Image (cartoon, rainbow, N blue to C red):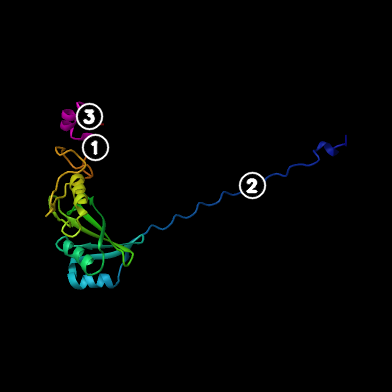
Amino acid sequence: MPEVPDGNPPNPVPAQAATTPAAAPAAAPKPVPQPWDCELVQQLKNSYGSGIHDAATFAGQNYLVVDRAVCHDVLLYLYQQLGYTSLTDLTAVHYPKDELPFEMVWILFSMAANERVRVKARFADGESAPTVTDRWVGANWMEREVYDMFGIRFTGHPDLRRILMPDEWTGHPLRKDYDPHKQDEVWVRKNLGIESGQ
């Protein structure tokens, strides 16, 4: 067996160099709305003036904020004059501390341009929004869902009633002031025979 000089192993493992932890990557900048200025927006401003409150792009999505007094007319104009013939969705958002706490959102699509636009309008609590079932029959169930979940009524809707919750249910589950721990306990006791649905 060969002699090992100084008692050291023949192939010592080199010590690992101390490394400095890599700095965490910088957080991506938070997107902010950018002005949306195009021929479509100019046409709407020419037709509805101050009824068009804002036109912006956020995270690649174009949207218009319009006055509730002209929202139905703007939606029809987008359909009839600008080719946004498909209603892909409509929904609402609840901001309970705002003077106009309910925001309606309609999402339209132009197949010819392959573009979407969101139209937003604010409404007071207890105020009705105009139905768009006169233009898009498919809005029927969408508006019923908004009514069921938020309590927003739609003027001119042909059959406005709940679509998800029982007809006798009290409250609207997607409102921010709806406490899920205090559901309609009377309905739960009467129909399910239990004290709480939780």
Q: Amino acid at mark 2?
A: Ala
Q: Is residue 26 magenta?
A: no
Near mark 1 (Cα within 10 A), the count class, few <14, some 14-19 or many ≥20, is few
Question: What residue lies at 23% left-to-right and 66% top-to-bottom?
Answer: 78
- Number of labelled discs? 3
Camera-nearest residue between 31 and 70: 70
The N terminus sits in image quarter: top right
Label 3 – label 1 distance at C-alpha: 11 Å
Q: Position of residue 15 (x, y in %)?
A: 70, 44
Secondary structure, mark 1, is: helix
Q: Position of residue 49 (x, y in %)?
A: 18, 70
Q: Amino acid at mark 1?
A: Pro
First in sequence: mark 2 vs mark 1: 2
Magenta stretch, overall SS:
helix
The C terminus sits in image quarter: top left
Residue 96 visible in this rendered orientation of the protein: no
State the image quarter where residue 108 is shown. Answer: bottom left
Residue 145 visible in this rendered orientation of the protein: yes
Residue hosting label 1? 180
On residue 18, the disc is 2
Residue hosting label 3? 196
State the image quarter where residue 166 is shown. Answer: top left
Question: What residue lies at 84% left-to-right and 38% top-to-bottom?
Answer: 6
Secondary structure, mark 3, is: loop
Secondary structure, mark 2, is: loop
Q: Is residue 166 above or below residue 84?
A: above
Q: Is residue 12 above or below residue 197?
A: below
Magenta-colored span: 181-194
